[in-house]
Amino acid sequence: MIYICINEGSNNATNNKKPQDMKNLVVCFHTTRGGQFYNAGHKEYRGQKTFSELTSELGGILFFIDDMIEDSSGDYVSCDDPTGLTGELDFDGQYDTWECKSIDECTDQELRLVIQDENYYKHPELQEALEELKDLV
């Protein structure tokens, strides 16, 4: 877990970022097979995407029943709000899991994946948040 300290005495705009701003900055990860030996548990950064956007994107294979989300075979994959900012779709526990989370909830490994992404510099708000977090990674 990474803790973000806000230094009110600094002139740096990132240090004055409010905690709720970080909560609204949502990034998406997909855990699948991959890596050198194509093992389970390979995590990939999939960009800035809310859970609502993800469920819309995967809508062809998801069914929304009461307070649950099921896949096309009827298996329960999530109880998160399909219109929310954050959430997780767990299709099988290790080979196919999608997670949308706020940037301040990311692990060190996840922050490294975001920083290594070739497109992160195109999103100023993400770049600003990562500049503060980069020293912690």
Image (cartoon, rainbow, N blue to C red):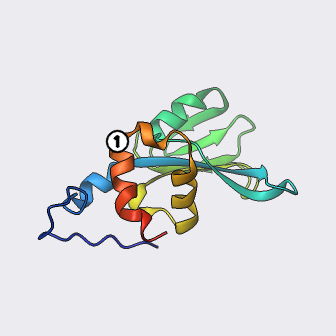
Extreme left residue here?
A: 9
Q: Horizontally, is 55 left or right of 62 in the view?
A: left
Q: Amino acid at mark 1?
A: Pro
Q: Position of residue 32 (x, y in %)?
A: 74, 50
Q: How many marks?
A: 1
At 19% from the left and 71% from the top, the residue drawn is: 7
Extreme right residue here?
A: 37
Secondary structure at badge 1 equals: helix
Extreme top residue here?
A: 60
Mark 1 neighbour density, 10 Å: few (under 14) some (14–19) many (20 or more): few
Q: Position of residue 117 (x, y in %)?
A: 56, 46
At 46% from the left and 41% from the top, the residue drawn is: 48
Q: Position of residue 107 (x, y in %)?
A: 52, 66
55 or 66, which lies in front? 55
Q: Position of residue 100 (x, y in %)?
A: 50, 49
32 or 61, which lies in front? 32
48 or 36, which lies in front? 36
Residue bearing the label numbered 1: 124
At 49% from the left and 50% from the top, the residue drawn is: 87
Image quadrant of residue 104? bottom left
- Can you see residue 79? no
Image: 104 above or below 55: below
- Can you see residue 126? yes
Image: 108 above or below 120: below
Q: Horizontally, is 49 left or right of 3 in the view?
A: right
